Image (cartoon, rainbow, N blue to C red):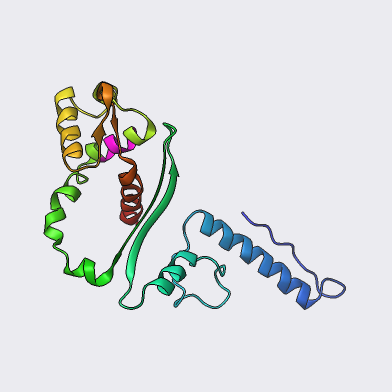
Amino acid sequence: MVEVESFEEGGGPTLEERLSAVEEVLAGLLAERKRRGRVSSTPESADEGAVPADLFWALEGLREREPAPGAVMIVGDVALPDGRTAGWQLGAGTDDLLDDEWESLADVFAALGHPVRLRLLREVLRGRGTARELAELEGMGTTGQVYHHLRQLVATGWLRVRDGGHHEVPAERVVPLLTTIVGGRR
């Protein structure tokens, strides 16, 4: 919680000093909201000065590079608990995306459509990799059920199997998976 000093009439701070103090508190609140990912306005809808000037740096850069009708981009730089890093950037033009056959992607998204598979992916990213380790987690079901879910995730490219039966999210899928999770939040 942010504390604001009270100002008394008379010999206290000037109006300019008081306004400066309010602006400082507001800047702190906006920085905290930004840090927590809770600023949801766009540059067009934001009042001048209401959000930090660099809040939409990625969006502004994309607009400079891609003329109307625009494009979308996913980008991220992730350090995983297993020591791997995944830096990834992928973009596509709006026209290309709207002309694409989305139906061909149904199995890729369907693989994410089960709570156990989502949990498996999260646990693999956290460092659990073998079917045995994953089956030992509470609420995962039987070993056979875990193998069933793992096969679906492998078949759609969300997981791959390394030597020794260890599963991992391929580096090229880490950022797309995490951005899908961010997009699913409300």
On screen, residue 98 versus residue 46, left or right, reads left
**Horizontal relation, residue 23 to residue 179: left or right:** right
Answer yes or no: is residue 41 visible.
no
In this rendered view, identify the residue nearer to me: 116 or 91: 91
Residue 47: x %, y % from top left: 52, 77
Q: Is residue 12 depicted above or below 178 in this figure?
A: below
Nearer to us in this view, 123 or 87: 87
Q: Position of residue 166 (x, y in %)?
A: 28, 26
Q: Nearer the viewer, residue 2 or 66?
A: 66
Q: Quadrant of residue 132?
A: top left
Q: Position of residue 158 (x, y in %)?
A: 24, 42
Within the magenta stretch, is there residue 86?
no
Q: What residue is rendered at 17% in x and 34% in y?
A: 149
For the question of whether residue 157 can be seen, the reply is yes
Q: Is residue 119 magenta?
A: yes
x then y, percent, for residue 48:
55, 78
Q: Nearer the viewer, residue 101 or 5?
A: 101
Classify the position of the C terminus by image quarter.
bottom left
Q: Which residues are magenta?
A: 118-123
Residue located 28% across and 68% down the image: 93
Which of the 4 image quarters holds residue 104?
Answer: bottom left
At x 18% / y 48%, what residue is drawn? 108
Judged left or right of residue 151, residue 38 is right
Question: Which residue does the image show at 78% across and 72% down from the upper left?
Answer: 17
Specify the quadrant of the image occupied by residue 165. top left
Give above or below for 129 relative to 60: above
Q: Secondary structure of the magenta portion, mostly?
A: helix
**Could you tell me which quadrant the N terminus lies in?**
bottom right
Count how many numbered circles sit on residues in the image.
0
Residue extending farthest to the right is: 11
